[in-house]
Image (cartoon, grey):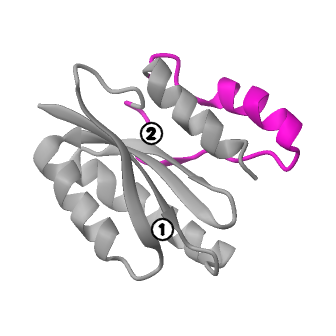
Amino acid sequence: MLSQYLYISTAPTLPREEVEAILSASAQNNPVRGITGLLLFNGRNFLQLLEGEESEVAALMDTITADPRHSGVSVLDRRGIDQRACPDWAMKRVMIAESIASRREMLEQELPDNLDPDVRKMIVNFAVLN
């Protein structure tokens, strides 16, 4: 059974290099575990979408929750899915435009077409918060 998790967390003091290290580790480890997804970081908070077999995603969520580089991990959405929204992304960093006005437009171009509308709305709303 495939599952999809969407969570947010707080990492206000995380340097850019650490974010890059997280993405690099994800790109290496996720394909082995059959996990795909995307990551947004606004300089203070992460929003991450994870997809894969339920047991693998649940185990990764345990690891993420225990990671001291961030806190306040909160699952916004968890659902069973028939197919992945991000099948080709081991972990894609979706960049958030500097201009709040252009964030929504930029995200709409970046996000996968077959993403559930409710999940898409949560991701876009996160990105336009700053």
Q: Quadrant of residue 85?
A: top left
Judging by the rendered image, the residue that carries numbered circle 1 is: 22
**Vertical position of residue 93 compared to residue 105: above or below:** below
Residue at figure coordinates x 36%, y 77% from the top left: 67
Q: Does 117 appear above or below 70?
A: above
Q: Residues within 10 Å of mark 1 (few under 14, many from 20)?
A: few
Marks 2 and 1, how far apart at CA: 15 Å
Q: Which residue is more in the foreground, 72 or 92?
A: 72
Query: From the viewer's perspective, is residue 80 above or below residue 40?
Result: above
Q: Residue at x 87, y 36 (%)?
A: 101
Numbered disc 2: secondary structure: loop
**Magenta segment includes 96:** yes
Residue 57: in magenta span: no
Q: Is 17 displayed left or right of 82 in the figure?
A: right
Q: Which amino acid, mark 1?
A: Ile
- From the top left corner, tell me how far across and down residue 94 is, in percent: 62, 44
Horizontal and vertical percent for residue 119? 46, 30
Q: Secondary structure at mark 1?
A: helix
Residue 47: which numbered mark, if any? none
Determine the image quadrant of residue 53. top left
The label shown at residue 89 is: 2
Which residue shows up at 37% across the image and 60% down it?
Answer: 28
Extent of the magenta region: 87-115
- Where residue 64 sits: x, y (%)? 33, 67
Looking at the rendered structure, the kind of residue marked 2 is Trp
Quadrant in the rendering for residue 114: top left
> Which x, y percent locates residue 17?
63, 76
Mark with earlier residue (2, 1): 1
How many discs appear?
2
